[in-house]
Image (cartoon, helix red, strand yellow):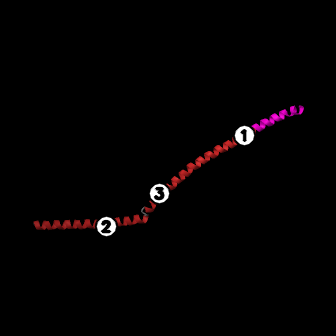
Amino acid sequence: MDTVQALLPYITIANFLLTWGLGFAIWLVRKNIATDQRVTTVEGHLIDKYEEHDNRLQHIETTLESAPTHKDLAAIYTRIDGLARDVNVLIGENNTQTDLLRTLVNKHIQ
């Protein structure tokens, strides 16, 4: 009995340390489980966002494929310049015809 009494403080200290050690280990495991759950949740949200961005990028790429290129725009501007020249020629011819008609009317009236 004296040996048990002599070992009692050591047993009490060992019990205290083992209890706190077990509590700490359980706390670490629970903390890791909570962290894993949060990481899993965030991963799910990120995957959803990535899929949304992927769909948006595919839509933009599809739209850009059908958009006019610089070459197309240059051809349009060239064609507009040609039309402007033709309109200027027609304006000049119209002015000439107006002046000629005015001259003919003036000669006919005199």
Are dots 2 and 3 in contact, CB under 8 Å?
no
User: Nearer the viewer's eye, disc 1 or disc 3?
Assistant: 1
Q: Is residue 42 above or below residue 106?
A: above
Give the magenta part as a residue range: 1-19
Q: Earlier in the sequence, mark 2 or mark 3?
A: 3
Gap in angstroms between the C-alphas marked 2 and 3: 40 Å
Mark 2 or mark 1: name the one nearer the start of the chain. 1
Q: Front-most of 5 and 99?
A: 5
Crowding around mark 3 (Cα neighbors within 10 Å: few <14, some 14 to 19, many 20+) is: few
Asked whether 16 falls inside the magenta stretch, the response is: yes
Q: Nearer the viewer, residue 62 or 91?
A: 62
Mark 1 / mark 3, whichever is N-terminal: 1
Q: Position of residue 16 (x, y in %)?
A: 78, 35
Closest to the camera, between mark 2 and mark 1, is: 1
Q: Which residue is pictured at 12% across the width and 68% down the height?
A: 107
- Residue type, label 2: Arg
Q: Specify whether residue 15 is painted magenta.
A: yes
Left of 21 or right of it: where is 44?
Answer: left
Disc 1 to disc 3: CB gap under 8 Å: no
Could you tell me which residue is drawn at 70 percent across and 42 percent down? 28
Q: Which of the 4 image quarters holds residue 104?
A: bottom left
How packed is label 1: few (under 14 Cα within 10 Å), some, or many (20 or more)?
few
Q: Residue at x 53, y 51 (%)?
A: 49
For disc 3, the marked residue is: 59
Q: CA distance from mark 1 to mark 3?
A: 52 Å
- Which residue is under mark 2? 85
Residue at the disc numbered 1: 24
At label 3, the amino acid type is His
> Where does the image place residue 36, in percent across and percent down from the top left?
64, 46
For the stretch drawn in magenta, the main secondary structure is helix
